Image: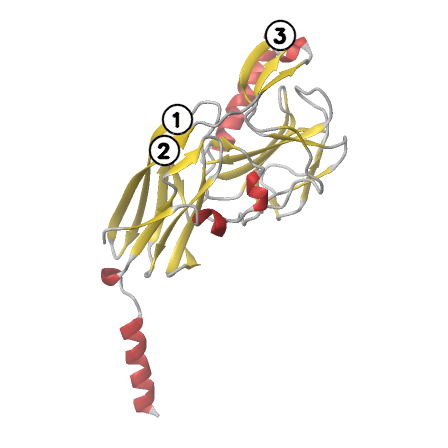
Amino acid sequence: MKTRKFLLLLLFVAITPSASFAASWVNFPTSWDIGQAFAVSITSTADYSSPVVTWMNRSISLNVEQGGAGKISYGLLGSDVRNIKPGNYAILFEFTQGGKKYKASGNIFLRAKEYPRENLRVSPKMVNPPKKELPRIRNEQKLVGNALRTMTPTRRWTTPPQPPLSSITLTSFYGKQRVYNGQPRAGHNGADIRAATGTPIRAPFAGTVVLTGFHYYAGGSVYIDSGNGVITAFFHLSQIDVKKGDLVEKGQIVAKSGATGRVTGPHLHYSLILGGQFVDPIPLLSTSITQMLKLGTQSMVNN
């Protein structure tokens, strides 16, 4: 019996991968549409730590999980239709393994995508706000900026997300160039979904509420951090049922829809922010991280 246990131990040691013999890969798309979310990953046959992906000048902390060939880190990234132009953009992966830091870099060509134009009539004060409202607007912009810089490494998001409403009927698509009362503004950074005032809104992912409030333009607003730079936001709410610091579960009711802020009528504005970039939230509702990674290219890291 003692001999058998000793042989089993030797076998386990022999097949357990060590950092010096680890094989590691990164996965990312070589080209993608502006405004659309994409998936990236790091995988390795051995354990590693401190995985980070840098994209659009933002370093995004990932976590290490069991999966793939041994260990894996998942990430969701994208580019904002408002301020990103077509062209090549650098992406950098970093992680530590066996006391050594590894890096893998590449480029993603972001393709131009056509988004339609939309003319809207709103209250004049929502296009050219009174001077007395400007300090409030600047303060709210600061609060939102701080919320969007939240970076937690623990992944609480899972795909596909929970739809925020039981029925998804779009009234305005992501990326539309908004023209308010004849004055052009930036492209729409979310999706507007038909919803009567008081309709319950559910969290797409588990996470932590990082900001709530009734803001000048966005009206009733909720921002939820789900880790790895993944943040969801809801605007124009009539009621907010959570507060900053609350932990929410996927599918939990967090608010009620409404017509607050700059609106033409009741609806839900739903935004998905990935590493600080506002992307189209709708395609992700019908796919998974596994399916998205199949659209990327896998490259071995030089160990």
Can you give x and y, in whole percent of width and height, for residue 214 in the image? 65, 25
Which residue corresponds to the image point at 34% horizontal and 53% vertical from the top-left?
49
Describe the element under mark 2 as helix, strand or loop: strand
| Location of mark 2 (residue) | 109
Residue 287 can be seen, yes or no: yes
Q: Marks 1 and 2, Cα distance to the nearest angstrom?
A: 7 Å
Q: Are marks 1 and 2 in contact (CB under 8 Å)?
A: yes
Quadrant of the image occupied by residue 109: top left
- For residue 63, say whether it is visible: no
On the rendered image, what quadrant is the C terminus found in?
bottom left
Q: Earlier in the sequence, mark 1 or mark 2?
A: 1
Estimate the spatial distance between the alpha carbons at disc 1 and disc 3, rounded to whole Å.
36 Å
Looking at marks 2 and 3 on the same chain, the residue that comes earlier in the sequence is marked by: 2
Q: Which residue is mark 1?
A: 86
Residue 125 lies, in percent from the top left, at 65, 10
Residue closest to the far bottom: 1
Look at the numbered disc 1 and give the secondary structure of its residue: loop
In the picture, the quarter occupied by the N terminus is: bottom left
**Which scheme is used to colour this image of the protein?**
secondary structure
Q: Residues within 10 Å of mark 3 (few under 14, many from 20)?
A: few
The residue carrying mark 3 is 130
Distance from disc 2 to disc 3, alpha carbons, whole Å, reads 42 Å
**Could you say where residue 131 lies in the image, as x and y percent from the top left?**
59, 7
Amino acid, disc 3: Pro
Q: Callout 1, which amino acid?
A: Pro
User: Dot 2: within a 10 Å radius of its alpha carbon, few (fewer than 14), some, or many (20 or more) residues?
Assistant: some
Q: Nearer the viewer, residue 183 or 223?
A: 183
